[in-house]
Amino acid sequence: MLLIGIIVCDDGVGVKLPDNSDISLSSTKRIVCGRMTPNAESLPTDESPLPPRTERRLLAIVLIVAGLLRLALICWRPESLAEDRDLYWGIAERLAAGDGYVHPTFGHPTAYRPPAYPFLLATILAVGGGIKTLAAAQIAMSVATVWLTWSLGRKLELGAASLIAAAFVALNPLLVQSASLAMTETVCMFLIMAGLRAAYSQPMSYRSVLATGFCCGLVVLCRPTAFLFVQLSTVIATVLVVRRLGLINRVFVIGGLFALTSVLPAELWAKRNHHIFCERIITTTHGGYTLLLGNNDEAYRAEVAQPFGTVWDSRTWQQTLDEEMTAAGLKHSDEVGRDRYLSNKAWAWIRQNPGKFAAASWLRVRRFWNISPSGADAETLPRPIRWGVAIFFLAELSLAAVGLCRLRRSDWSRWWPLLVLIVSFSAVHVVYWSNLRMRAPIEPALALLATFGVMRFLLRRPVATSHLKRFTEHDLRD
């Protein structure tokens, strides 16, 4: 992602002059937006109301609470990490056994699931670890995500209020639950926040560009939904750099470094898939199923046409669908053919039923932004917990909406990557199957936006906008 912090002031771009400039500035003057201003150190800043030591202590408490909450849930339901809902454990076991990336049941090479998470599990198994090791890894990544949220909040000039965003992530019921499941949410969220934090580094270095690209490459192989976010962010950042700074040569250098680290993992995966399936699959062969799962007559009758919250048991439909593909001559090993068959079936249904598709899409939007969980897992929760979850998400989303509405024109240059993240994930799940769990990767971004809403509305405190934002070729350190 050339997310490389295209951060500008209200009416132009702040440029830091090189040391050998003909203009004598000493240490007290810089040119900002075409005019002389005091040095950045003398400009107004967002002073923290908390002493640094107090803030560090509070941050440590938040991090400890985040770890303990996730540990408590895992200890309460230790079997949850052993459940293999999406075949990740099965694929990892075959990998660790030396069989390659194959389907755990049928034994044929597969691209049905993205490879990043199964390789993580296979690594754990290869070193002799198991459920406890995975628990420790996911708790560590969760705590790291809390820290990254706080650090990114500082980069967004939220000051000590960044602790509020960190607390939102630490206490988030969806994220606490995600750490107790053998699914991709925790790893995906960590990679996204690590990539964003590297992208917001000031001054930018080639190392931070490489780190951003590496995280982007891995997150696509962890959760293909992130592919749209990476592509949109790259295009927007490139346009902003060229349009506002005109640094064509520097864009080529940065773009090359980013491409090297972000495209390489996907390229290796695509080459492997081309060798096996004769097609360059850069995501998975699971997309057709996910598309059809939310766009078919059975789903419409059992969910869309029913009261909100009704959950469809699709197991019989899945069995019928498998028999239908087998009768059509599509073996389980023909993943590309099956994926294409399901995708064509889904798009045909969408074209034939535009009204039903619109209703189904609206249901997916409501599910994605729902404030309370549904399904079998939710039914096992006591009512007070379900009410607590609903109150938490209602508060978070309301404050995030306030923060979005209170963004000023000068704020968009800092906040656009997070907004693109939220919009891209939301847009994908308008078409593809969705529920509340699909929102997990963007929860830290929502927490930061909610914190912005707190500062702008509840606390009636303006968020300082730095008068000097630097992004020139002199900011890129060798």
Image (cartoon, rainbow, N blue to C red):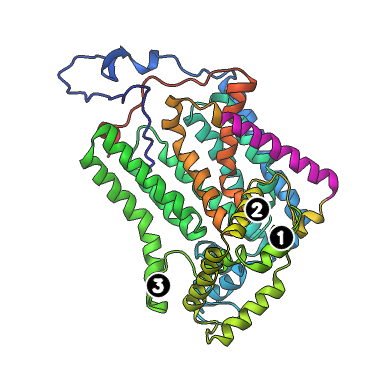
Circle 1 is placed at which residue position?
Answer: 303
Quarter of the image with the C terminus is top left
User: Tag on residue 272?
Assistant: 3
Q: Residue at x 64, y 37 (%)?
A: 397
Q: Main secondary structure of the magenta part?
A: helix
* Element class at badge 2: helix
Q: Residue at x 45, y 49 (%)?
A: 229
The image quadrant that residue 276 belongs to is bottom left
Q: Is residue 238 above or below residue 136?
A: above
What x and y, as percent, mark residue 74?
A: 73, 54
Can the viewer see residue 378 in this picture? yes
Q: What range of the chain is rendered magenta?
A: 382-403
Q: Is residue 94 magenta?
A: no
The kind of residue on which mark 3 rests is Arg
Can the viewer see residue 286 in this picture? no
The answer to whether mark 1 and mark 2 are in CB contact below 8 A is yes
Q: Is residue 101 above or below residue 214?
A: below
Work out whether mark 3 precedes mark 1 in sequence or the reverse, and give the earlier one: 3
User: Tag on residue 259?
Assistant: none
Work out whether mark 1 precedes mark 2 in sequence or the reverse, and give the earlier one: 1
The kind of residue on which mark 1 rests is Glu
Q: Residues within 10 Å of mark 2 (few under 14, many from 20)?
A: many
What x and y, as percent, mark residue 382?
A: 85, 49
Circle 2 is placed at which residue position?
Answer: 363
